[in-house]
């Protein structure tokens, strides 16, 4: 035991910590805190600017062009503004059962993806090939997940709108609007 203690004492003697080291560490920590605060503020400003940009491109410009009976506009500098249909959708956890029921009832269940997941321990690879019912009978925890991929949902919403098929937009968190695209010259 005394050998171990002497090794620690030798290592401790080799380390010399002075005020400059501690001052440097404190300075770096202060700088890190300042950067964290700055990043937080920049994130807040970025979020604000993104919302302002969204309002301009999805509301103000399309509305103004619509009032003038225009879908596009070419500016003096050669850049152009064009308003096109815009689709967005998101099924929340609260609306998931209702949305999936609606899709199944109306024959659109092909966009629902089904995932069955089973967790196995070490050495249980061969059991993995069994059927879902066999696994349940054997007492393995089986997890089934259903979902509609976001891009698939967006494409489906676009298709339904373009075909004139009515569907509960609230259930699917669907947002249908116009969006201005500005292209530089």
Image (cartoon, rainbow, N blue to C red):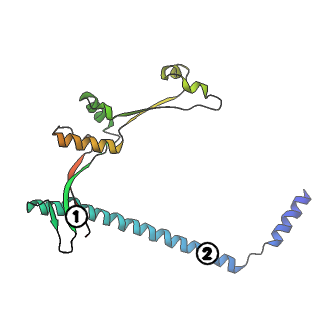
Q: How many marks?
A: 2
Q: Residue at x 54, y 71 (%)?
A: 32
Residue where numbered disc 1 is placed: 56
Q: Secondary structure at mark 1?
A: helix
The N terminus, quarter of image: bottom right
Residue where numbered disc 2 is placed: 26
Image height of 85 relative to 170, above or below: below
Task: Give the camera-side residue of 114 and 48.
Answer: 114
Count neighbours of disc 1 (C-alpha within 10 A) and say few if under 14, some if 14 to 19, many if 20 or more.
some
Image height of 133 relative to 92, above or below: above
Q: Residue at x 31, y 66 (%)?
A: 49
Tell me where residue 24 sits by quadrant: bottom right
Task: Give the camera-side residue of 51 and 9.
Answer: 51
Where residue 184 appears, as percent x and y from the top left, is 26, 69
Using residue 17 as the reference point, say whether residue 82 is left or right of it. left
- Marks 1 and 2 sit apart, C-alpha to C-alpha, by 45 Å
Tell me where residue 12 sits by quadrant: bottom right
Using residue 87 as the reference point, say whether residue 16 is left or right of it. right
Task: Give the camera-side residue of 54 and 151.
Answer: 151
Q: Confirm or deny contact between disc 1 and disc 2 (CB under 8 A).
A: no
Task: Give the camera-side residue of 38 and 18.
Answer: 38
The disc, 1 or 2, on the residue closer to the chain's N-terminal end is 2
Image height of 154 relative to 59, above or below: above
Using residue 131 as the reference point, say whether residue 78 is left or right of it. left
Q: Residue at x 13, y 63 (%)?
A: 64
The C terminus, quarter of image: bottom left
Where residue 57 appears, as percent x and y from the top left, is 23, 62
């Amino acid at each position: 035991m005394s050998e171990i203690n002497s090794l620690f004492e030798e290592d401790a003697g080799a380390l010399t910590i002075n005020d400059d080291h501690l001052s440097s560490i404190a300075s770096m920590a202060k700088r890190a805190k300042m950067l964290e605060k700055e990043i937080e503020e920049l994130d807040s400003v970025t979020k604000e600017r993104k919302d302002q940009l969204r309002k301009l491109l999805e509301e103000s410009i399309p509305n103004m062009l619509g009032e003038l009976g225009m879908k596009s506009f070419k500016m003096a500098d050669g850049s152009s503004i064009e308003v096109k249909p815009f689709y967005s959708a998101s099924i929340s956890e609260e609306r998931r059962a209702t949305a999936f029921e609606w899709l199944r009832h109306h024959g659109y269940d092909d966009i629902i993806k089904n995932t069955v997941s089973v967790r196995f321990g070490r050495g249980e690879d061969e059991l993995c090939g069994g059927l879902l019912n066999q696994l349940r009978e054997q007492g393995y925890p089986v997890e089934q997940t259903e979902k509609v991929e976001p891009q698939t949902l967006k494409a489906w919403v676009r298709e339904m709108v373009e075909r004139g098929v009515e569907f509960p937009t609230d259930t699917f968190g669907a947002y249908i609007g116009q969006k201005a695209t500005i292209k530089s010259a």
